[in-house]
Image: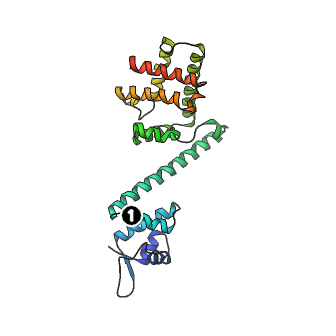
């Protein structure tokens, strides 16, 4: 099946002049030129045009697009890359829609959106760490779960998290041992909190990976400056780490 330049331009939402320009700069040649001088485009040309138009929407210049297309081995590779980029674009749009809906909900309830709720993904700030340790699916499951909550549900979750942190801080300030019953009850509460997050080993009931995750999180709390302030100071974060480690090794 083939399309004339006018048919392709109309379907793609561009002008015939644009398609001729793409041919002129070596981006998209017609599949054939008829004896009457008409340009015709087959499926492969249409697939290539899809790639070009997507990259243009992403803000890429024609020379950069030419480099990308030159590196593609065949049409199937190009289509796979095209699908991946479309999925990423879809995810970005969906995040914006969810953010706008939450902002609208917050405004209707008289709340201040920026101060009231984390409108970004649940674990966006730790994307690389989550993916490297637990995989892309775990990262996406956490974000999908978070964005599936209403504004009130997100607020409730944040309150639970803040209450848990406050309980840890109080225990650290009281000077209790990380292996004490009080500290271990907090560790159990922490693990139950984690098990409510889809995609985590604790949610999936994977004991070995759950133990590894709890120990890794404890290490991150103690080693990452972002958490030291959350748990009062470095000593408080170390207390949480030691309590979680003890719980993971003896009670999970």
Query: Percent position (x, y) of residue 239?
Result: 53, 20
- Disc 1 is placed on an element classified as helix
Q: Residues within 10 Å of mark 1 (few under 14, many from 20)?
A: few
Quadrant where the N terminus sits is bottom left
The image's colour scheme reads: rainbow
The residue nearer to you, when weighing 190 against 36, is 190
At 55% across and 34% down in the image, what residue appears?
154
Query: Percent position (x, y) of residue 73?
Result: 33, 63
226 to 14, vertically: above or below: above
Q: Is residue 195 visible?
A: no
The residue nearer to you, when weighing 143 against 74, is 74
The residue nearer to you, when weighing 202 against 95, is 202
At 62% across and 39% down in the image, what residue appears?
106
Left or right: where 116 falls relative to 82: right
Residue matched to label 1: 71
Res 203 → quadrant: top left
Left or right: where 3 falls relative to 125: left
Quadrant where the C terminus sits is top left
């Amino acid at each position: 099946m083939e399309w004339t330049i006018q048919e392709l331009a109309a379907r793609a939402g561009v002008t015939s002049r644009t398609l001729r320009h793409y041919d002129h700069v070596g981006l998209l040649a017609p599949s054939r030129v008829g004896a009457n001088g008409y340009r015709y485009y087959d499926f492969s040309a249409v697939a290539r045009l899809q790639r070009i138009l997507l990259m243009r929407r992403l803000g890429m210049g024609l020379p950069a697009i030419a480099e990308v297309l030159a590196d593609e081995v065949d049409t199937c590779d190009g289509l796979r890359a095209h699908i991946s980029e479309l999925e990423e674009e879809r995810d970005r749009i969906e995040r914006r829609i969810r953010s706008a809906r939450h902002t609208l909900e917050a405004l209707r309830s008289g709340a201040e959106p920026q101060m009231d709720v984390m409108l970004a993904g649940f674990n966006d700030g730790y994307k690389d760490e989550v993916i490297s340790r637990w995989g892309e699916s775990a990262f996406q499951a956490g974000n999908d779960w978070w964005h599936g909550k209403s504004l009130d549900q997100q607020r409730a979750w944040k309150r639970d998290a803040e209450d848990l942190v406050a309980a840890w801080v109080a225990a650290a300030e009281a000077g209790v041992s990380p292996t004490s019953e009080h500290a271990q009850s907090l560790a159990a509460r922490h693990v139950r909190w984690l098990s409510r997050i889809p995609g985590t080993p604790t949610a999936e009931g994977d004991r070995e990976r759950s133990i590894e995750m709890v120990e890794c999180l404890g290490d991150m709390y103690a080693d990452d400056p972002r958490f030291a302030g959350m748990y009062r100071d470095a000593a408080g974060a170390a207390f949480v780490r030691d309590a979680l480690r003890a719980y993971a090794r003896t009670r999970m």
